[in-house]
Image (tube, rainbow, N blue to C red):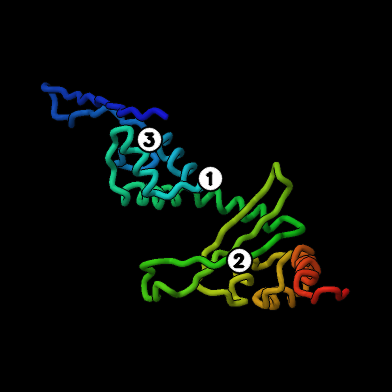
Amino acid sequence: MQIRAIKYIRKIYGCRGCEAAPFTAEKPAQLIEKSMASPSVLAMLLTTKYVDGLPLHRFEIVLSRHGIEIPRQTPARWIIQCSEHFQPLINLMRDRLLESPIIHCDETRVQVLKEPVRDPTSQSWMWVQAIGPPDRKVVLFDYASSRAQEEPLRLLENYRGYVMTDDNAGYNALALQSDVERLAGMAHARRKFVDAPKVQPKGKT
């Protein structure tokens, strides 16, 4: 990895013989206005965090080894600002998801610290929806503070097709819709048979 400081010099031209305002050369387009982060730095930050699973405090250490001292709040703010640019892409991914004849769904617990009006020990949920073959996969993550059945109804509103889930009762309301067929995950059914021999008494079949 190489980190370089790129310096842009913007010249200002003015006419002494007229009253026109001085003209300043345009600056290069920035993904985040008035930020020192180039697109390549932002791409590296997002890749190391979300693809390689590197926490921001470790990213801060990596930068410091290269002589770059940046407080952790700065890359955290960059990530939030980048997410605003991703919304059109997320919208396209959701359109592709809802066009699929089958959607795989699951939800997993997450703990969010310092969330307004919520206790730090309270549980939140990341709802995951996935479709497609390996070369055209779409995976969407949606955060919610609830595991209630309103969440899949909201995420898959107006969807028509098959939904593969586990036995979570939160999907029951979605399955009651006339255009939605709920499928059972075979891995969950198989799990009970695999676990049964482990708990049966010795010598019993």
Residue 96 pos. (x, y %): 67, 52
Query: Distance from label 1 to label 2 (Cα)?
Result: 20 Å
Label 2, secondary structure: give it.
strand
Query: Distance from label 2 to label 3 (Cα)?
Result: 35 Å
Whether the residues at callouts 1 and 2 have beta carbons within 8 Å, the answer is: no
The numbered mark at residue 51 is 1
Numbered disc in front, either 2 or 3: 2
The numbered mark at residue 63 is none
Q: State left or right for residue 127 relative to residue 195.
A: left
Label 3, secondary structure: give it.
loop
Query: Considering the image in quadrants, where does the N terminus appear?
Result: top left
Residue 161, can we see it?
Answer: no
Residue at the image point whose x is 40% and y is 75% from the top: 118
Query: Considering the image in quadrants, where does the C terminus appear?
Result: bottom right
157 relative to 24, above or below? below
Residue 43 pos. (x, y %): 46, 39
Q: Pointer 3: what residue? A: 38
* Kind of residue at disc 3: Ser
Q: Residues within 10 Å of mark 3 (few under 14, many from 20)?
A: some
Query: Distance from label 1 to label 3 (Cα)?
Result: 19 Å
* Residue 162, image quadrant: bottom right
Q: State left or right for residue 16 relative to residue 96.
A: left
Q: Earlier in the sequence, mark 1 or mark 2?
A: 1
Q: State left or right for residue 134 relative to residue 69.
A: right
Numbered disc in front, either 1 or 3: 1
Q: Nearer the viewer, residue 13 or 126?
A: 126
Q: Pointer 2: what residue? A: 107
* Kind of residue at disc 2: Glu
Q: Nearer the viewer, residue 2 or 77?
A: 2
* Kind of residue at disc 1: Val
